[in-house]
């Protein structure tokens, strides 16, 4: 989660506005969810990921998140902080 918060650290040169803080607060549940998926759910294999997906999806609504996609496993998505939406990992990788 630290990597998402780096842009919101105020320094002598960079001041963080109230608007930026509001922006961060509006996406904190999504950032937490993404971080939880990859810190807790990364310790398993495909069978475990399928079980984790089923269990984790049961708690997503309790976190107040209503925009999480239902098509694939939770591990197949990342939260795009610039677009403020969930994206499939494979759509974020540039072709080479």
Image (spheres, grey):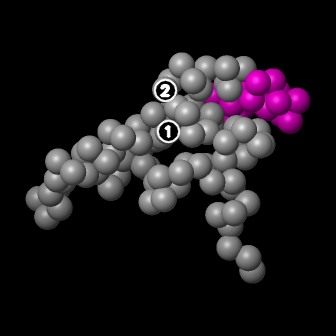
27 is higher (above) or lower (below) than 29:
below
Write the residue at 67% across / 20% down: 58
**Residue 23 shown in magenta:** no
Q: Residue furthest right?
A: 47
Q: In this orientation, does residue 85 appear?
A: yes
Graded by Cα atoms within 10 Å as few (under 14), some (14 to 19) or many (20 or more), the crowding at tag 2 reads few
Structural distance between the alpha carbons of marks 2 and 1: 9 Å
Image spot of residue 9 (x, y percent): 25, 50
Residue, disc 1: 30
95 is higher (above) or lower (below) than 32:
below
Range shown magenta: 40-54
Tag 2 near tag 1, CB within 8 Å: no
**Residue 43 shown in magenta:** yes
Q: Quadrant of the C terminus?
A: bottom right
96 is higher (above) or lower (below) than 66:
below
72 is higher (above) or lower (below) than 81:
above
Tag 1 secondary structure:
helix
Residue, disc 2: 64
Tag 2 secondary structure:
loop
Write the residue at 31% across / 48% down: 23
Graded by Cα atoms within 10 Å as few (under 14), some (14 to 19) or many (20 or more), the crowding at tag 1 reads many
Write the residue at 32% across / 39% down: 25
Q: In this orientation, does residue 9 appear?
A: no
Q: Is residue 62 or residue 3 the one in the foreground?
A: 62
- The picture quadrant where one finds residue 43 is top right
- The picture quadrant where one finds residue 48 is top right
Q: Magenta: predominant secondary structure element?
A: helix
Q: Residue furthest left?
A: 12
Image spot of residue 3 (x, y percent): 44, 50
Q: Residue furthest front?
A: 66
């Amino acid at each position: 989660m630290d990597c998402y918060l780096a842009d919101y650290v105020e320094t002598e040169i960079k001041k963080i506005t109230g608007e930026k803080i509001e922006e961060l607060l509006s996406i904190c549940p999504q950032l937490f969810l993404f971080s939880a998926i990859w810190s807790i759910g990364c310790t398993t294999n495909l069978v475990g990921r399928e079980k984790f997906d089923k269990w984790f999806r049961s708690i997503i609504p309790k976190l107040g998140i209503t925009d999480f996609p239902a098509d694939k496993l939770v591990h197949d998505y990342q939260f795009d902080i610039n677009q403020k939406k969930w994206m499939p990992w494979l759509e974020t990788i540039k072709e080479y």
